[in-house]
Image: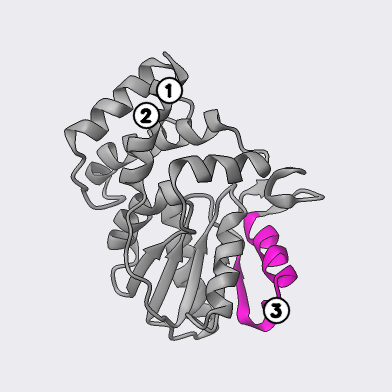
Amino acid sequence: MAESLIDHYAEILFDYHFLKQPLVKADCILVLGSHDPSVADYAAQLYHGGFAPYIIFSGGVVRPVGELRNTRPRSEAEAFFEIAIEQGVPAEAIILENNATNTGENFIFTKKLLAHKGLEFRSFILIQKPYMIRRTYATAMVQFKEYDFVVSAMPDTYQSYLVRCAAEGISKERVISNMTGDLQRLRVYPEKGFLIAMDIPEQVWSAYEHLLEAGFEGRMAT
């Protein structure tokens, strides 16, 4: 498939996944685990912008040297913590959840952590990569429904996001395969009770099928 067609179909998926909601101030910013360090950059920006007085970084997946600006293997939450500290967020404003290995666990373990610490946060800004925003919302509607929340990601277009990812060593192939994997999850996870059903327009599903035919199927749920 021609590169221009790949980009055409991938941009359709990116724009669909990037569900946009207006930002509002909240009790806490909750950043879900990811291989993309820009989520920590964005959380720091929102903190300094006065959108919330606390940040929770949730993610227990240990990323190797080179990912998440790591100089040694460490969990997503630990790497995000270091990024935020470097950007002037005070350590006392950061809470780490170091066990979650998937989106559902980000919410489940965060709720347990809040209960353990006696924290009564009621509203959240949920932060993820642009192309995981819709799934984050759909999952939170099941796993985090007792809280008020909005979902958000650093503003990006498909092309500008690829440029930022390339600068972090994240390949275009990885991004597109992740996007097809996320769309598949939006289709199959509601019946498992993991997230609410989301309408997937025919144009989006067609773009997904074209990308699968082109070989972008590296992150399918089993």
Residue topped by disc 2: 8
**Residue at 31% of width from left, 50% of height from top?**
194
Which amino acid type is shown beneath numbered disc 1? Ser
Q: Is residue 88 magenta?
A: yes
The residues colored magenta run 76-97
Residue 19 higher or lower than 113, as above or below: above
Residue drawn at 32 percent across, 54 percent down: 19
Specify the quadrant of the image occupied by residue 143.
bottom left
User: At which x and y percent is residue 196?
Assistant: 23, 52
Tell me where residue 75 appears, x and y as whole percent: 67, 54
Q: Position of residue 85 (x, y in %)?
A: 72, 71
- Residue 158 position (above or below residue 2): below
Q: Is residue 180 visible?
A: yes
85 or 189, which is in the foreground? 85
3D distance between C-alphas at marks 1 and 3: 45 Å
Specify the amino acid type for callout 3: Ala
Mark 1 vs 3: CB contact within 8 A: no
Q: Main secondary structure of the magenta part?
A: helix
Q: Which mark is residue 4?
A: 1
SS at mark 3?
helix
From the viewer's perspective, is 96 left or right of 107?
right
Q: Name the residue furthest right.
A: 71
